[in-house]
Amino acid sequence: MEANSAYECLNRTPKRHAWMGQMTDVDDEACYSDWDKLPQELAERVLACLPVASVFQCRSVCKKWMSILTSSSFLDLWAKVSPQVSWFLVYNNSHGFAAFSPATNRWNNIPIFARCSLDPRQVLLMASSGGLLCFRSRNTEFTTLTVCNPVTKTFRVLPDMLQIRYIDILGMVADRNSNSYKILVTGTTESSVGYSITELYDSSTESWVHHCHSERDCLQFWYEVHAIWCEGFFYCLTMMPISSTQGYRLLAYDMQQKDWFDLSVKIPSNNLRCPSLLACQGRLLLTGKIVVENTIKSVCIWELDRISLKWKEIDSMPAFILNKIHVPHFLVIQCFGNSDLICFSRYRGSQSVMYDLSRKTWHWIPDNNVCKERKAQDTTALDRNNLVGMSFEPSLASKV
Protein backbone atom coordinates (compact mmCIF):
# COMPACT_ATOMS: atom_id res chain seq x y z
CA MET A 1 0.00 0.00 0.00
CA GLU A 2 1.36 3.40 -0.90
CA ALA A 3 2.29 5.44 2.15
CA ASN A 4 0.69 8.84 1.72
CA SER A 5 0.91 11.67 4.20
CA ALA A 6 -1.16 11.05 7.32
CA TYR A 7 -3.20 14.18 6.90
CA GLU A 8 -3.62 13.95 3.15
CA CYS A 9 -6.75 11.88 3.68
CA LEU A 10 -8.63 14.81 5.25
CA ASN A 11 -10.12 16.20 2.06
CA ARG A 12 -10.83 12.86 0.40
CA THR A 13 -12.23 10.70 3.20
CA PRO A 14 -14.98 8.33 2.08
CA LYS A 15 -18.38 9.64 3.06
CA ARG A 16 -19.10 6.68 5.30
CA HIS A 17 -15.85 6.91 7.25
CA ALA A 18 -14.70 9.58 9.69
CA TRP A 19 -11.15 10.79 9.21
CA MET A 20 -8.99 9.65 12.11
CA GLY A 21 -12.11 8.91 14.13
CA GLN A 22 -14.50 6.11 14.88
CA MET A 23 -15.67 4.13 11.87
CA THR A 24 -19.39 3.61 11.45
CA ASP A 25 -21.58 1.67 9.05
CA VAL A 26 -18.76 -0.47 7.63
CA ASP A 27 -19.54 -3.69 5.82
CA ASP A 28 -17.80 -6.70 7.37
CA GLU A 29 -17.94 -8.41 4.00
CA ALA A 30 -15.23 -6.01 2.86
CA CYS A 31 -12.57 -8.04 4.71
CA TYR A 32 -10.45 -10.06 2.36
CA SER A 33 -10.71 -13.80 2.94
CA ASP A 34 -6.93 -14.34 2.94
CA TRP A 35 -6.41 -11.75 5.65
CA ASP A 36 -9.36 -13.15 7.57
CA LYS A 37 -7.50 -16.45 7.93
CA LEU A 38 -4.41 -14.88 9.52
CA PRO A 39 -3.99 -15.07 13.30
CA GLN A 40 -4.37 -11.62 14.86
CA GLU A 41 -0.79 -11.62 16.14
CA LEU A 42 0.59 -12.18 12.64
CA ALA A 43 -1.77 -9.62 11.11
CA GLU A 44 -0.63 -7.08 13.70
CA ARG A 45 3.03 -7.68 12.87
CA VAL A 46 2.41 -7.08 9.19
CA LEU A 47 0.23 -4.01 9.68
CA ALA A 48 2.57 -2.50 12.29
CA CYS A 49 5.07 -1.78 9.51
CA LEU A 50 2.69 0.72 7.93
CA PRO A 51 2.96 4.50 8.43
CA VAL A 52 0.18 6.47 10.10
CA ALA A 53 -1.74 7.31 6.91
CA SER A 54 -1.90 3.71 5.74
CA VAL A 55 -3.08 2.54 9.16
CA PHE A 56 -6.03 4.94 9.01
CA GLN A 57 -6.83 3.82 5.50
CA CYS A 58 -6.79 0.18 6.62
CA ARG A 59 -9.13 0.98 9.51
CA SER A 60 -11.73 1.82 6.90
CA VAL A 61 -11.67 -1.67 5.35
CA CYS A 62 -13.90 -3.47 7.84
CA LYS A 63 -14.84 -3.74 11.49
CA LYS A 64 -12.36 -6.54 12.13
CA TRP A 65 -9.47 -4.49 10.83
CA MET A 66 -10.70 -1.53 12.85
CA SER A 67 -10.66 -3.75 15.94
CA ILE A 68 -7.14 -4.99 15.22
CA LEU A 69 -5.73 -1.57 14.38
CA THR A 70 -7.11 0.08 17.51
CA SER A 71 -6.13 -2.67 19.96
CA SER A 72 -3.57 -1.89 22.65
CA SER A 73 -1.37 -4.79 21.51
CA PHE A 74 -1.20 -3.38 17.98
CA LEU A 75 -0.48 0.17 19.15
CA ASP A 76 2.34 -1.05 21.40
CA LEU A 77 3.84 -3.03 18.52
CA TRP A 78 3.40 -0.15 16.05
CA ALA A 79 5.30 2.16 18.38
CA LYS A 80 8.28 -0.21 18.31
CA VAL A 81 8.52 -1.16 14.63
CA SER A 82 6.74 1.51 12.57
CA PRO A 83 8.83 3.66 10.21
CA GLN A 84 9.64 7.05 11.71
CA VAL A 85 8.35 9.92 9.60
CA SER A 86 9.39 13.49 10.37
CA TRP A 87 7.47 16.46 9.00
CA PHE A 88 8.16 20.15 9.27
CA LEU A 89 5.33 22.16 10.78
CA VAL A 90 4.52 25.66 9.62
CA TYR A 91 2.72 27.40 12.42
CA ASN A 92 0.47 30.45 12.31
CA ASN A 93 -1.52 31.20 15.41
CA SER A 94 -4.60 32.46 13.55
CA HIS A 95 -4.69 30.08 10.62
CA GLY A 96 -3.53 26.74 11.94
CA PHE A 97 -0.79 24.48 10.62
CA ALA A 98 0.64 23.19 7.41
CA ALA A 99 3.25 20.44 7.22
CA PHE A 100 5.83 19.59 4.61
CA SER A 101 6.57 15.89 4.14
CA PRO A 102 10.06 15.21 2.72
CA ALA A 103 9.02 11.63 1.92
CA THR A 104 6.23 12.74 -0.44
CA ASN A 105 7.60 16.21 -1.21
CA ARG A 106 4.16 17.64 -0.53
CA TRP A 107 2.46 20.12 1.78
CA ASN A 108 -0.53 19.12 3.91
CA ASN A 109 -3.14 21.01 5.87
CA ILE A 110 -3.37 19.94 9.54
CA PRO A 111 -6.42 20.83 11.69
CA ILE A 112 -4.48 20.59 14.96
CA PHE A 113 -6.47 23.19 16.88
CA ALA A 114 -9.77 21.46 16.11
CA ARG A 115 -8.44 17.99 16.87
CA CYS A 116 -6.93 19.08 20.20
CA SER A 117 -9.86 21.28 21.27
CA LEU A 118 -7.65 24.38 21.41
CA ASP A 119 -8.51 28.01 20.80
CA PRO A 120 -5.78 29.41 18.49
CA ARG A 121 -6.25 32.86 20.04
CA GLN A 122 -5.41 31.56 23.51
CA VAL A 123 -2.37 29.30 22.99
CA LEU A 124 1.14 29.42 21.56
CA LEU A 125 3.09 26.41 20.29
CA MET A 126 6.26 25.90 22.34
CA ALA A 127 7.71 22.46 21.61
CA SER A 128 7.32 19.16 19.77
CA SER A 129 8.66 15.70 20.49
CA GLY A 130 7.67 12.11 19.73
CA GLY A 131 4.34 12.99 18.11
CA LEU A 132 3.31 15.33 20.93
CA LEU A 133 2.90 19.11 20.85
CA CYS A 134 3.22 21.43 23.84
CA PHE A 135 1.29 24.72 23.96
CA ARG A 136 1.32 27.46 26.57
CA SER A 137 -1.52 29.79 27.40
CA ARG A 138 -1.44 33.39 26.20
CA ASN A 139 -2.44 36.60 27.96
CA THR A 140 -3.17 34.90 31.26
CA GLU A 141 -1.96 35.78 34.75
CA PHE A 142 -0.57 32.28 35.30
CA THR A 143 0.98 30.27 32.50
CA THR A 144 -0.68 26.95 31.72
CA LEU A 145 0.85 24.22 29.54
CA THR A 146 -1.16 21.80 27.41
CA VAL A 147 0.21 18.68 25.72
CA CYS A 148 -1.71 17.08 22.86
CA ASN A 149 -1.48 14.31 20.28
CA PRO A 150 -3.36 15.53 17.19
CA VAL A 151 -3.38 12.05 15.63
CA THR A 152 -5.24 10.42 18.53
CA LYS A 153 -7.25 13.57 19.38
CA THR A 154 -6.08 13.48 22.99
CA PHE A 155 -4.82 16.33 25.15
CA ARG A 156 -3.88 17.05 28.75
CA VAL A 157 -3.72 20.33 30.65
CA LEU A 158 -0.67 20.02 32.88
CA PRO A 159 -0.83 20.94 36.57
CA ASP A 160 0.46 24.37 37.55
CA MET A 161 4.19 24.81 37.82
CA LEU A 162 5.50 25.02 41.37
CA GLN A 163 6.88 28.56 41.26
CA ILE A 164 7.45 29.72 37.69
CA ARG A 165 5.13 32.39 36.29
CA TYR A 166 7.21 33.71 33.38
CA ILE A 167 8.83 31.22 31.00
CA ASP A 168 12.27 32.03 29.60
CA ILE A 169 12.98 28.70 27.96
CA LEU A 170 11.19 25.41 27.42
CA GLY A 171 12.38 22.05 26.16
CA MET A 172 10.53 18.78 25.62
CA VAL A 173 11.74 15.21 25.09
CA ALA A 174 9.64 12.08 24.59
CA ASP A 175 10.82 8.56 25.41
CA ARG A 176 9.40 6.10 22.91
CA ASN A 177 10.33 3.03 24.97
CA SER A 178 8.47 4.10 28.11
CA ASN A 179 5.84 6.11 26.21
CA SER A 180 6.43 9.08 28.48
CA TYR A 181 7.81 12.59 28.14
CA LYS A 182 9.57 15.29 30.14
CA ILE A 183 9.23 19.06 29.89
CA LEU A 184 11.98 21.32 31.19
CA VAL A 185 11.06 24.92 31.99
CA THR A 186 13.36 27.71 33.16
CA GLY A 187 11.77 30.97 34.20
CA THR A 188 11.03 33.35 37.05
CA THR A 189 8.38 34.11 39.62
CA GLU A 190 8.50 37.80 38.69
CA SER A 191 9.93 39.56 35.64
CA SER A 192 12.37 41.59 37.75
CA VAL A 193 13.69 38.81 40.01
CA GLY A 194 17.49 38.31 40.07
CA TYR A 195 17.53 34.54 39.59
CA SER A 196 15.96 31.86 37.39
CA ILE A 197 14.15 28.71 38.48
CA THR A 198 14.22 25.41 36.60
CA GLU A 199 11.43 22.86 37.00
CA LEU A 200 10.80 19.51 35.31
CA TYR A 201 7.49 17.85 34.48
CA ASP A 202 7.49 14.04 34.15
CA SER A 203 4.42 12.48 32.54
CA SER A 204 5.10 9.18 34.27
CA THR A 205 4.46 10.82 37.67
CA GLU A 206 2.17 13.57 36.32
CA SER A 207 3.92 16.13 38.49
CA TRP A 208 6.49 18.93 38.56
CA VAL A 209 9.71 18.83 40.56
CA HIS A 210 12.07 21.67 41.40
CA HIS A 211 15.54 21.28 39.90
CA CYS A 212 17.66 24.37 40.53
CA HIS A 213 18.12 28.12 40.92
CA SER A 214 20.47 29.92 38.51
CA GLU A 215 21.94 33.40 38.54
CA ARG A 216 20.30 35.68 36.01
CA ASP A 217 23.63 37.04 34.75
CA CYS A 218 24.08 33.68 33.02
CA LEU A 219 20.53 33.10 31.86
CA GLN A 220 19.01 36.54 31.28
CA PHE A 221 20.02 36.91 27.65
CA TRP A 222 18.15 34.04 26.05
CA TYR A 223 18.49 33.86 22.29
CA GLU A 224 16.03 31.02 21.76
CA VAL A 225 13.01 30.03 23.78
CA HIS A 226 13.30 26.40 22.69
CA ALA A 227 15.84 24.07 24.27
CA ILE A 228 17.24 21.41 21.95
CA TRP A 229 17.49 17.83 23.23
CA CYS A 230 20.55 15.88 22.11
CA GLU A 231 22.12 12.77 23.63
CA GLY A 232 20.93 13.26 27.19
CA PHE A 233 21.27 17.05 27.45
CA PHE A 234 19.21 20.13 26.69
CA TYR A 235 21.11 22.85 24.80
CA CYS A 236 20.40 26.49 24.03
CA LEU A 237 22.15 29.63 22.83
CA THR A 238 22.18 32.76 24.97
CA MET A 239 23.27 36.22 23.97
CA MET A 240 26.38 37.58 25.65
CA PRO A 241 26.50 41.12 27.12
CA ILE A 242 27.10 43.90 24.59
CA SER A 243 30.65 44.36 25.90
CA SER A 244 31.58 40.81 24.86
CA THR A 245 33.12 40.07 21.44
CA GLN A 246 31.68 36.54 21.41
CA GLY A 247 28.06 37.44 20.78
CA TYR A 248 26.65 34.08 21.84
CA ARG A 249 27.45 31.28 24.25
CA LEU A 250 26.33 27.68 24.34
CA LEU A 251 24.68 26.40 27.52
CA ALA A 252 23.77 22.83 28.40
CA TYR A 253 21.43 21.43 31.01
CA ASP A 254 22.61 18.29 32.80
CA MET A 255 19.58 16.22 33.77
CA GLN A 256 21.63 14.24 36.31
CA GLN A 257 23.23 17.21 38.04
CA LYS A 258 20.05 19.27 37.60
CA ASP A 259 21.81 22.45 36.58
CA TRP A 260 22.77 24.66 33.64
CA PHE A 261 26.45 25.10 32.76
CA ASP A 262 28.42 27.09 30.21
CA LEU A 263 30.31 24.86 27.76
CA SER A 264 32.77 27.68 27.02
CA VAL A 265 32.59 26.90 23.31
CA LYS A 266 33.89 29.63 21.03
CA ILE A 267 31.42 30.72 18.37
CA PRO A 268 32.89 29.95 14.92
CA SER A 269 32.74 33.57 13.71
CA ASN A 270 32.24 37.00 15.26
CA ASN A 271 30.21 37.84 12.15
CA LEU A 272 27.66 35.09 12.84
CA ARG A 273 24.05 36.25 12.66
CA CYS A 274 20.72 34.47 13.24
CA PRO A 275 22.26 31.27 14.65
CA SER A 276 20.11 28.19 15.24
CA LEU A 277 20.89 25.05 17.20
CA LEU A 278 19.85 21.76 15.61
CA ALA A 279 19.88 18.13 16.69
CA CYS A 280 20.13 15.53 13.91
CA GLN A 281 20.75 11.83 14.55
CA GLY A 282 22.63 12.54 17.78
CA ARG A 283 24.71 15.33 16.23
CA LEU A 284 24.58 18.85 17.67
CA LEU A 285 24.66 21.33 14.81
CA LEU A 286 24.80 25.08 14.46
CA THR A 287 23.59 27.00 11.41
CA GLY A 288 23.78 30.68 10.66
CA LYS A 289 24.71 33.36 8.22
CA ILE A 290 28.03 35.21 8.07
CA VAL A 291 27.33 38.91 7.57
CA VAL A 292 29.99 41.48 6.74
CA GLU A 293 29.05 45.12 6.22
CA ASN A 294 25.35 44.22 5.97
CA THR A 295 26.05 41.68 3.24
CA ILE A 296 25.52 37.92 3.63
CA LYS A 297 28.81 36.30 2.66
CA SER A 298 27.79 32.71 3.38
CA VAL A 299 25.33 30.44 5.16
CA CYS A 300 27.15 27.67 7.01
CA ILE A 301 26.51 24.47 8.94
CA TRP A 302 28.81 23.48 11.81
CA GLU A 303 28.94 20.38 14.01
CA LEU A 304 30.15 20.41 17.60
CA ASP A 305 33.13 18.15 18.25
CA ARG A 306 32.33 16.99 21.78
CA ILE A 307 35.91 16.01 22.50
CA SER A 308 37.61 19.27 21.54
CA LEU A 309 34.45 21.35 22.18
CA LYS A 310 34.97 23.19 18.91
CA TRP A 311 32.59 23.91 16.06
CA LYS A 312 33.73 22.34 12.79
CA GLU A 313 32.25 23.48 9.50
CA ILE A 314 30.68 20.62 7.55
CA ASP A 315 29.17 22.51 4.62
CA SER A 316 28.00 25.88 3.31
CA MET A 317 25.27 26.96 0.96
CA PRO A 318 26.38 26.92 -2.70
CA ALA A 319 26.83 30.32 -4.31
CA PHE A 320 24.11 29.80 -6.94
CA ILE A 321 21.54 29.07 -4.20
CA LEU A 322 22.75 31.86 -1.94
CA ASN A 323 22.57 34.36 -4.79
CA LYS A 324 19.00 33.37 -5.58
CA ILE A 325 17.71 33.32 -2.01
CA HIS A 326 19.87 36.18 -0.74
CA VAL A 327 17.96 39.11 0.78
CA PRO A 328 18.69 41.22 3.87
CA HIS A 329 15.94 39.53 5.90
CA PHE A 330 16.97 35.95 5.17
CA LEU A 331 16.48 33.69 8.21
CA VAL A 332 17.83 30.27 9.04
CA ILE A 333 15.19 27.77 10.08
CA GLN A 334 15.66 24.79 12.37
CA CYS A 335 15.99 21.22 11.14
CA PHE A 336 13.60 18.28 10.90
CA GLY A 337 14.20 16.84 14.35
CA ASN A 338 15.58 13.33 14.16
CA SER A 339 16.08 13.24 10.42
CA ASP A 340 19.08 14.34 8.38
CA LEU A 341 17.31 17.34 6.88
CA ILE A 342 17.77 21.05 7.50
CA CYS A 343 15.46 23.63 6.02
CA PHE A 344 16.44 27.21 5.16
CA SER A 345 13.99 29.91 4.16
CA ARG A 346 13.66 33.61 3.53
CA TYR A 347 11.52 35.34 6.09
CA ARG A 348 8.05 35.69 4.55
CA GLY A 349 9.64 34.80 1.24
CA SER A 350 8.65 32.55 -1.61
CA GLN A 351 11.74 30.33 -1.65
CA SER A 352 13.00 27.62 0.67
CA VAL A 353 15.79 25.12 0.31
CA MET A 354 16.52 21.84 2.09
CA TYR A 355 19.89 20.32 2.90
CA ASP A 356 20.40 16.57 3.27
CA LEU A 357 23.18 15.91 5.80
CA SER A 358 23.78 12.30 4.81
CA ARG A 359 23.97 12.98 1.06
CA LYS A 360 25.38 16.51 1.32
CA THR A 361 22.89 17.73 -1.27
CA TRP A 362 20.70 20.83 -1.61
CA HIS A 363 17.32 21.06 -3.30
CA TRP A 364 14.45 23.49 -3.50
CA ILE A 365 11.19 22.92 -1.62
CA PRO A 366 7.98 23.29 -3.65
CA ASP A 367 5.68 26.20 -2.97
CA ASN A 368 3.57 25.95 0.15
CA ASN A 369 0.16 25.89 -1.55
CA VAL A 370 -1.65 25.36 1.76
CA CYS A 371 -0.45 28.70 3.11
CA LYS A 372 -0.84 30.26 -0.31
CA GLU A 373 -4.55 29.43 -0.26
CA ARG A 374 -4.90 30.84 3.25
CA LYS A 375 -3.21 34.06 2.22
CA ALA A 376 -5.60 34.41 -0.71
CA GLN A 377 -8.47 34.26 1.77
CA ASP A 378 -6.83 36.48 4.37
CA THR A 379 -3.93 38.88 3.86
CA THR A 380 -2.73 38.26 7.45
CA ALA A 381 -2.09 34.58 6.75
CA LEU A 382 1.34 33.06 6.27
CA ASP A 383 3.23 33.76 3.10
CA ARG A 384 3.83 30.81 0.83
CA ASN A 385 7.01 29.46 2.40
CA ASN A 386 7.21 31.28 5.69
CA LEU A 387 8.65 28.27 7.50
CA VAL A 388 8.26 29.31 11.09
CA GLY A 389 7.86 26.03 12.91
CA MET A 390 9.39 22.81 14.13
CA SER A 391 9.57 19.09 13.45
CA PHE A 392 6.69 16.71 14.10
CA GLU A 393 6.52 12.91 14.04
CA PRO A 394 2.89 11.74 13.79
CA SER A 395 2.24 8.92 16.23
CA LEU A 396 -0.62 6.53 16.94
CA ALA A 397 0.82 5.48 20.28
CA SER A 398 2.21 8.55 22.09
CA LYS A 399 0.26 9.21 25.27
CA VAL A 400 -0.36 12.63 26.75
Image (spheres, rainbow, N blue to C red):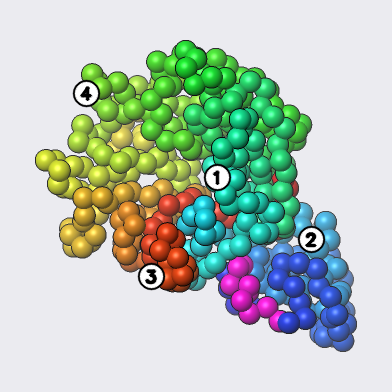
Callout 3 touching callout 1 (CB < 8 Å): no
Q: Which residue is mark 3?
A: 366
* Residue 210: in magenta span: no
Q: Is residue 292 above or below residue 120?
A: above
Residue sitting at x 47%, y 13%: 194
Give, as a three-letter code, the residue at label 2: Phe
Q: Position of residue 69 (x, y in %)?
A: 79, 66
Residue sitting at x 62%, y 58%: 112
Q: Position of residue 190 (x, y in %)?
A: 53, 19
Give, as a three-letter code, the residue at label 4: Thr
Q: Nearer the viewer, residue 18 or 396?
A: 18
Which quadrant holds residue 381?
bottom left
Residues packed near mark 1 inside 10 Å, few (<14), some (14 to 19) or many (20 plus): some
State how far apart marks 2 and 3 are (Cα).
36 Å
Dot 1 or dot 2: first in sequence order is: 2
Q: Dot 3 lies on which element?
A: loop
* Residue 8: in magenta span: yes
Give, as a three-letter code, the residue at label 3: Pro
Q: Which residues are magenta?
A: 6-14
Dot 4 or dot 3: first in sequence order is: 4
State how far apart marks 4 and 3 are (Cα).
39 Å
* Circle number at residue 214: none
Q: Which residue is mark 2?
A: 74
Callout 4 touching callout 1 (CB < 8 Å): no
Q: Is residue 360 above or below residue 135?
A: below
Which quarter of the rendering shows the C terminus? Answer: top right
Give, as a three-letter code, the residue at label 1: Leu
Dot 2 or dot 3: first in sequence order is: 2
Q: Which residue is mark 4?
A: 245
Residues packed near mark 3 inside 10 Å, few (<14), some (14 to 19) or many (20 plus): some
